[in-house]
Image: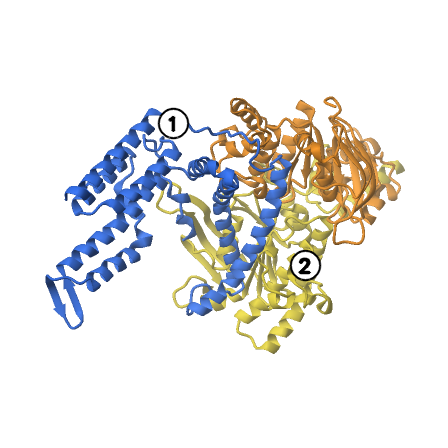
Amino acid sequence: MPIEVLHLTHCYSEGSVLRTVALDDVSFTISDGEFVGIIGHTGSGKSTLVQHLNGLLKPSSGQVLIDGEDLNGEHVNRRALRQRIGLVFQYPEYQLFEESVEKDIAFGPKNQKLSPDEIAERVRYAMDCVHLDYERYAARSPFELSGGQMRRVAIAGVLAMKPSILILDEPTAGLDPSGRDKILSMLEELHQREHVTTLMVSHSMDDMARLADRLLVMSEGKIVADGTPREIFAQEDMMTSIGLDVPEAARLCARLRARGYDLPADLFRPEELKEYLIRLWKEGSAC
Amino acid sequence: MLNNITMGQYYPVDSKIHRLDPRIKLILTIAFIVIVFLAKTFAGYALIFAFVWMVSRIANIPFRMLLRGLKPLRIIIILTFLLNLFFTSGNTVWVQFWVIRITKEGFMQAAFYSLRLVFLVLGTSLLTLTTSPVSLSDGIEILLTPLKKIHFPAHELAMMMTIALRFIPTLLEETDKIMKAQMARGADFESGNLISRAKAMVPLLVPLFVSAFRRAGDLAMAMESRCYHGGEGRTRLRVLKITRNDWIACAIMALLLALIILEGIFL
Amino acid sequence: MQSDTRVQLSNVTYTYEEQASPALSGVSAVIQPGEFVAVLGHNGSGKSTMAKLLNALYIPTDGNVVVCGYNTREEKYVWEIRQRAGMIFQNPDNQIVATVVKEDVAFGLENLGVPTEEMLPRIESALAAVRMSKYADNAPHMLSGGQKQRVAIAGILAMEPSVIIADEATAMLDPSGRKEVLDTIRALNRQKGITVVWITHFMEEAALADRVLIVTGGEVRLSGTPAEVFDRVDEMREMHLDVPHMTSLASDLRAEGMPLRPGILTVDELVEEVERLCPLKSST
């Protein structure tokens, strides 16, 4: 279910002195099953873009097509279209409200007007996806859980709607390293298992290096780069010029090249660098 | 919708009125309210209107800003007018058909009472348009300080008001975020009858409340960490001073009061 | 008592009311004046509990905490302690009390009963130290997370503390906000000699400290310079903590036989070592 964004522009406070252009002629296509990372400095337009993909915001000009249908078109059933897109906001645990984990996760399916049996099945499915044991957690109050668990309940609430497109805004924000690892593993597994088209907005280059097939790099409301992590992280200068980092391994690679070492310009995984350096050392010591 | 709410209606320009001591302004507003109730004729109202117009000119406030304060209450004002119009007994009948009876006396009374409401709102609007929420809260705290003797929590009240004011924009932002998150899960805040719309508010209100409690706990810890221990021994950054303009304002209000009293006696 | 600005924990145990096992047990540490100490641990390790014991928000169930010469058990000194050991918290919004930045910075001064004439100069110098002077008359809700945290720091600075305790102050910020706040605190530590206790779960922040305390399961498991602590990669991994990428890479390389020196934390350090061990055949 591809997404097509055509010349999307969004201005806040149109017609007043405070007019700001949050998105400036943004165009891209996302194919079925891709895992796309959206990166950019704060204020680059990432959050605005994401809210357009779900129809929460209307474009000032341009179009958002989901599966060929214009999200903001006149005769479109927007609510039905919207429900195929699951959007997980930042700090999603702040939206939990029900008495039990089960009921909260069921909120989405209920709004989709599914039968009670289907709803129950969706809840189990979603809890399984986020590795929350049904027997242990379904009846508990979400407010008793730890921060990381609450976040997984919130994500389950969106997964229960079985969206064909999953969009996550900074899913690891505020979590400690092991919490982050759990969420990322979960997303990795989910993507491999269900092949849901996934878009992830994040500041963490390490997260992107791990999960994304493709990166959209944003700056000042525009898309400035579109490519695989390997291609993008090789361009350290470009990234720094727009206020972004590259993973440390990529930086190491760039520094070594600058010092005259002959390694491929686009290494960015620590394992790759390890292999290269071991080889380099063994060759050197053999002389 | 949520973007258009300006904090406390404060209209931040500079003027003699803006610079008056908030305590004086509070007292004068109360005096003004009393004066509005004392006025008995339209002549008195004309005087009051002239006063309001004059103050808004000195305060550099466009009159339409003042009138905007009436918008939320327009239904009550209209209702007051209509009730008095139809249900006051009088002799000079203007219109009569079926059970509807409009008399001259009814009309005059309707006009009088609805104008009274209008002036009450305009008077308080003048206060909130020319006094920042923080100054107001300062003024209220100091005016209520004498009540501390009977254990009235004047300082705590003012602290609550300031903190509430500080968090209004933050809470509005949060409401927006929660609404969007629930809408992304298919929640519908717009359609349906009154009952279903009330039910739809639960996914909005519960998270807000939970978050508000958490904020309160965090804030209390942060305040204690900065040595907050209630009102005892506290000094203030903002010190209020009564100037000559304050006395002039009092004199003008006293004059208005005198005129209205005279109007009540002679007209 | 004025000159002693150490922070001492002696065998401190703390158990929360409703819980059976202690959040912190038998912790001892001394933080010297002017030190920048990072307390690193995952969520639930006890590090936040430790922070709140340092300014008498919590009193130890067992053991003693002595801050700048005052024991936190002595209730009558609570305000002296909190004036000398200021704390900033994780949520940038939930520590700002006033509607205008300048007035929030004044909050602590008002609580301390500082005379009005003295307040404005102290506020101005505090705002200048965090580079927020031009926002003095702004409303806090219009600021970014990093800016809000800097206002919070200014609010503490105005009270002229000897110690600043930062309880996961960057956890809710984006990378640029984190950098802003960390840079500000490091400058205060170096230029004004303010002792800093920096609670965090970001190891790249801990790597910048003078000393790191690793807290896990309510105990201080490791203590030392960042280089010393992070080199113990296996122990760190076992405690579910990250080590800097370069340290981890260096450790893996050493396991394959490459004799890298210990204590590598940054890209530049690793590059140096690679140049030492695998010198380029000179072709210039």
Chain identifier of the yellow chain: A
Q: Quadrant of the N terminus of chain A?
A: bottom right
Give the CA separation, mark 1 to mark 2. Answer: 54 Å
C76 above or below C18? above
In the rendered image, residue B261, in percent from the top left (x then y), is placed at 22, 40
Q: Is residue B70 left or right of residue B152?
A: left
Front-most of B83 and B261? Answer: B261
Q: Quadrant of the C terminus of chain A?
A: top right
The chain under label 1 reads B
> Does residue C178 show up?
no
Give the number of the disc on residue A144: 2
Query: Few, some or many C-alpha atoms within 10 Å of disc 1 (few <14, some 14-19, many ≥20)?
Result: few
A11 above or below B103? above
Front-most of B201 and A78? Answer: B201
Palette colour of chain C: orange
Palette colour of chain B: blue
In the rendered image, residue C269, in percent from the top left (x then y), is placed at 77, 33
Amino acid at pointer 2: Glu
Residue holding disc 1? B242
Name the residue rendered at 64%, 70% in the picture. Answer: A123
Front-most of C136 and A92? Answer: C136
